[in-house]
Amino acid sequence: MFFTVFSFLAGSIAVFGGGILVKYIKKLEGRKKVLAWFLMGLWYAWTLAGISFVILSVIEKHHKAATVGSVLFFFVAIATAILLGRWLDIIKLSPKKDRAVEV
Amino acid sequence: MSKQKQKDEQRKTFCVTRRNFLQGGASLATAAGLFALMNKNIAKASPTLVGPAASDIVLSKGTLPVATRPMPNNDEWLGTSKIVGPIKRTHEKDIGFYQAAVGKFGEEAKKGTANFARKHPMGRAICDMTNFIAMEEAVDGQPAEEKLPIPDPEQMSRHIKNLAFFLNADEVGIGVLPQYAVYTHQAPPMPQVLAGTADFSQSQPVDLSHHKYVIAVLVDQDLRTMLGSTGYDGVSASQSMQAYLFSGVIACTIAAYIRNLGYSARASHFSNYSLAMPPVLIAAGLGEMSRTGECVLHPRLGFRHKAACVTTDLPLMPDSPIDFGLREFCSHCMKCAEECPNGSISLERDQKEFNGYLKWVGDMKQCTIFRATNDEGSSCGRCMKVCPWNSKEDSWYHSASVYASSKSKMVSRLLRDMDDIFGYGTEIIEDYRWWLEFPELYR
């Protein structure tokens, strides 16, 4: 059961995440491109470690470990995903509207 | 297109030239040759079934999560336990429960000793079963007159370990028997002591000087049961007793087998000890002495086990004692001492001398009294329950944590804190409480 769920989630993140990211990373050049792939690899490993930890803890009924693990792993994973997203310009801040011009 | 032409076309399509045929044949022959080479052991196995075992297979139950370093078994060290003076052999009556049984720890403890493992119906059932292997005929006997042919010591050791795993041991090790572990005398059977009919002056002297080696087996007390327990509720004594029972059965069977081969062998187990187990386990490479001062911690099972052993003159190749960083870990973890319900475990940072060697010296009297008189359950195993090495299932992150802890003091401190944050050890998992509780029987 663990391997089925884990493989599905790992594959989904790899396919969808990679598919979305590849076009953004392609725009980068040289060292920045390598760094971006490296950071993505780290993020992917961290997220999978978190998923695996939480699933195994739930299976083994370590409820406190599962709860603390979810918060710890996924808080860090989401925070770093936002930072990476900003760096790669995937997440754009909405442009400030100049009300005076609109008028 | 006529039918004849169509047939000709088909023949051309499936035509096999001589070159293709030879290539195919050569490929098949190569593949068959490789397969035969890879499986030569299968072909060889059947003729050696009679006579010395030749197989390299080891039927182990799991791999160790840490790298271990071999340590000496000599006059200065037994594994990571430092020997600082002559170690005196002891009389079996010096152990805690015998002291309690003769009334040295008070009347209540004396009364409790008679009943502490038997007050839960399941504990009583398992205790009764251990009586069947307590008899002298079960643990010892005359070896067969004629020695049967056996393989060299290395192969024989592997064979004996496989036998132990086959008999359902969780871990097994072979060591050079430290003679100071052997009791000077065996105490009279506990029922006689409790009934007040025992005569200690008639204690049987023990001599195992003709036995060079010891085979030690460990049986797990069951992780999930432990996770569901407080450590001192109704199932606690049953956990101990089941592991004592089955390790005893395994030891008696191995001893009988060795005697059938024509060599001398004596089993020692809960119901019939001839020696103290902790030094034997260390000598057999099954762990290091923990902060409890009594329990030897195995790198995979922690001290969630009970042990039995066989001393023998069978030629064997002994394992070395091991070091996996436990002494350093225990020196600053202290979780067992902090969680002990009766404060029996030392909170000192450094080890102290005890009977010629260094260890964390616990309060045996307090520990025995609590286990004998615990009115919330049957016996106590709280230290086992909370120890960060005991309370985990096999998983990559626990293996990684244990490995890192064994390598770095700083990491092990961090992991002790993480252990608390994640709730390991102190968490009681209700889903695993499968046994029946009878609180009215515990008082």
Image (cartoon, coloured by chain):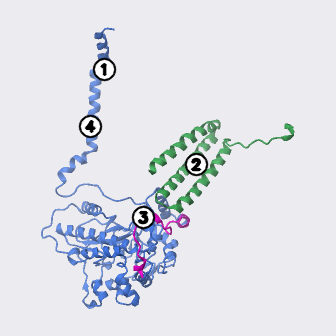
Chain colours: A green, B blue
> What's the distance in space between the residues labelled 2 and 1, CA to CA?
53 Å
Q: Quadrant of residue B354?
A: bottom left
The foreground one among B67 and B11 is B11
Question: Chain under label 4?
Answer: B
Disc 3, SS: helix
To which residue does mark 4 refer?
A: B32
* Eye-nearest disc, 4 or 2: 2
Looking at the rendered structure, the kind of residue marked 4 is Ala
Looking at the rendered structure, the kind of residue marked 2 is Trp
> What's the distance in space between the residues labelled 3 and 2, CA to CA?
33 Å
Question: Chain under label 2?
Answer: A
Q: Are marks 4 and 1 on the same chain?
A: yes
Q: Are marks 1 and 3 on the same chain?
A: yes
Which of disc 3 and disc 4 is earlier in sequence? 4
> What's the distance in space between the residues labelled 4 and 1, CA to CA?
25 Å
To which residue does mark 2 refer?
A: A43
Q: Which residues are magenta?
A: B414-443
Q: Are marks 4 and 2 on the same chain?
A: no
Res. B224 mark: 3
